[in-house]
Image: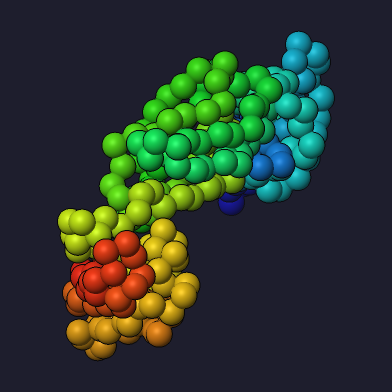
Amino acid sequence: MRFLKPLASAALCAALVISSTAVFSAAAKKPTLKVANKTSSIKVKWSKVKGAKKYSLLCKKGSGKFKKVYSGSKTSFSFKKPKAGKKYTFKVKAAGGKYSAAKSIIRLKTADVFYAEEDLDMKGIILKWTKVKGAKQYLLYRSVRSKDSFKKIATVSSSVSSYHDKGLKSIESYKYYVVAVNGSSKSAKGAQAHEIYGYYNFKTNAPLTLTIKKGEKYTDIFEKLDRYFATGLVKWKSLNTKIVKVSSVGEFTGVKKGKATVLATVKKGAYKNNKEKTIKINVTVK
């Protein structure tokens, strides 16, 4: 029995060594840090370290010294009221561990689109946006209403704050937003603007296309036809009300998924040649 005590002590020591090693290993892991510009702040996020109960986040403004800006159990932090055009560098560590690799970002405000209009020659849409301090480039994104998704259409120098978007489809609704860029630093998405390009061509009498969502109410596609519709010179009819309904003032409602045709009959006297015409609108409800 006298040998049991030393053995127990040895086992306890081994357990303590294993436990302390596990704690040390967990604390020694470095979090992975991510930073991003938001509308009014810089969002800082980092990966969770197993076993860590507390984190310390440091920030350096420009070429200054690192200062602690957060201490706690969360794995994200919003750095409020950063100055436009200024560089911010962050690093974080779990309690008892080592600091992560530093991540820098230049504070870029949003580049809001404040103007989107057809040019005088009706060859496209002209965009204008607010200039952003510290930006080196601007990325321009466009959404075609019928496709309902944004794609990058251009990268322009920071020396300009306007763009002429050409080659557009008539009576189609386009939306735009701009992102300011400086190296790997990007701004949040700026305020959007939208414009419907062109007028309906009564000479060709070509059908229009419209894609809406189930349950959606939509009228924007007829913004360019208000010169006829606003005076009550149009009669509306859906050929399949189980798919899409249309009101007396041209408001479309997607009832269920499918395709249907809507007829807009423009009465005699609404345009120059005074003949009655029917516009066919091919509607897809998603």
Compared to residue 38, the image places residue 87 above or below, namely: above
Residue that appears at 43% across and 24% down = 155
Residue that appears at 32% across and 62% down = 272
From the top left corner, tell me how far across and down residue 85 is, in percent: 70, 22
Furthest residue in direction bottom, as rendered: 242
Residue 50: which quarter of the image? top right
Residue that appears at 18% across and 60% down = 206
From the top left corner, tell me how far across and down residue 70 is, in percent: 78, 38
Left or right, residue 184 beside residue 270: right
Residue that appears at 39% across and 36% down = 121
Whether residue 269 is visible to the viewer of this picture, yes or no, is yes
Left or right, residue 81 beside residue 247: right
Compared to residue 207, the image places residue 267 above or below, namely: below
Q: Pick the residue in front: 40 or 204.
A: 204
From the top left corner, tell me how far across and down residue 168 is, in percent: 31, 42
* Image quarter of the C terminus: bottom left
From the top left corner, tell me how far across and down residue 110 is, in percent: 63, 36
